[in-house]
Amino acid sequence: MVSAGIVGGTGYTGVELLRLLASHPEVELKVITSRSEDGTAVADMFPNLRGRVDLRFTTPDVGALSECDVVFFATPHGVAMKSAGELLERGVKVIDLGADFRIKDIPLWEKWYGMEHTTPELVAEAVYGLPELNRSGIRDARLIACAGCYPTAVSLGYLPLLEQGLIDLRGMIADCKSGVSGAGRAAKVATLMCEVDSSFKAYAAPGHRHLPEIRQNLSRIAGADVPVTFVPHLIPMIRGIHATLYGTVADRNTDLQALFESRYADEPFVDVMPAGAHPETRSVRGGNMCRIAVHRPQGEDTVVILSVIDNLVKGAAGQAVQTMNIMFGLNETAGIDAITVLP
């Protein structure tokens, strides 16, 4: 059994981790931390976990966490980098669901996140946690920087085209929509029900914090700089990301459907839909699946890729569990292979 701890167990990604790990056949939950809820029973805050999680929240303590095989950080940026080093020194593997170790360019990270990075040496070591892109690196890692939600949907959508050099690197556009849970659990006026219901808006059009991560991924895959345009939108639902991705194909004779099906044939959590399909966010709700469809409208040289995920699962907690499974040599689908919920 793998013993696991969670730092930051009261946010949306934290409770998703709890839900998934509580039913994982190879995991024992040992520690769940929260400074504000110290002493509170987990099941009192999250009644869906009654009878499944008997732990209480505790104040973060490196000594207690070091008794775990792996510690997940489901925390805002700036938290994991303060404790990860000491846990690693004690032989604990670390999986950060936040942004502390994703961006390799430290000055760029500091620009977008507005603080000094205190452990740049760990950024150099951290392995980017997107299994479909980096499975072999994850297998031997002791520190994982889990991919962000928008970057997951965008990267998986563009990946087959970039790997084969079949898309013009200029003019790539990622038009993405997210449910409100992506903004986190903290109360904000902009995410109140009365503010978001029956409304739809773009935000951060001049630049979003996930943009440098998206560009880093796409540029790595392509082997050249990819100046993608990324515009996120907020839609009035709880879960889900829908990424509509545009580009220009280099060769109209390429069978794009066959390309995508071949690339993802052995990936347990990427489902390439039949030609002409339009994947829906409700089809991935609560699951670790990314569903993709590829289109070439009117047979011209414009390609449109549709990519949907649950931002809290494949975009966060589920992906973290998937990387843990790989790190510890477990069945990659263990604990995250449940059928998604409909309606």
Image (tube, helix red, strand yellow):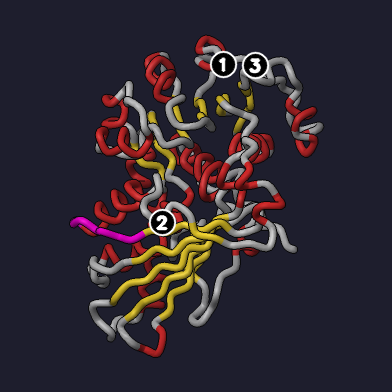
Q: In which quarter of the image is residue 82?
A: top left
**Residue visible at 69% across and 58% down?**
197
Type of secondary structure dominating the magenta stretch:
loop
In-front residue for pair 91/78: 78
Residue 205 shows which numbered tag? 2
Quick one: label 1, few (<14), some, or many (20+) residues within 10 Å? some
Q: Locate residue 125 relative to residue 174 in the image: left or right.
A: left
Q: Mark 1 points at which residue?
A: 60
The N terminus is located in which quarter?
top right
Residue mark closest to the camera, 1 vs 2:
2
The C terminus is located in which quarter?
bottom right
**Place of residue 171 in the rendered image (x, y in percent of width and height, measured from the top left):** 28, 69
- Which amino acid lies under the numbered mark 2 shown in the image of this protein? Ala
- Residue stretch rendered in magenta on the structure: 223-229
Q: Name the residue under label 3.
A: 58
**Residue visible at 42% across and 14% down?**
90
Q: Are discs 1 and 3 less than 8 Å apart at CB?
A: yes
In-front residue for pair 340/172: 172
Quick one: label 2, few (<14), some, or many (20+) residues within 10 Å? few
In-front residue for pair 42/66: 42
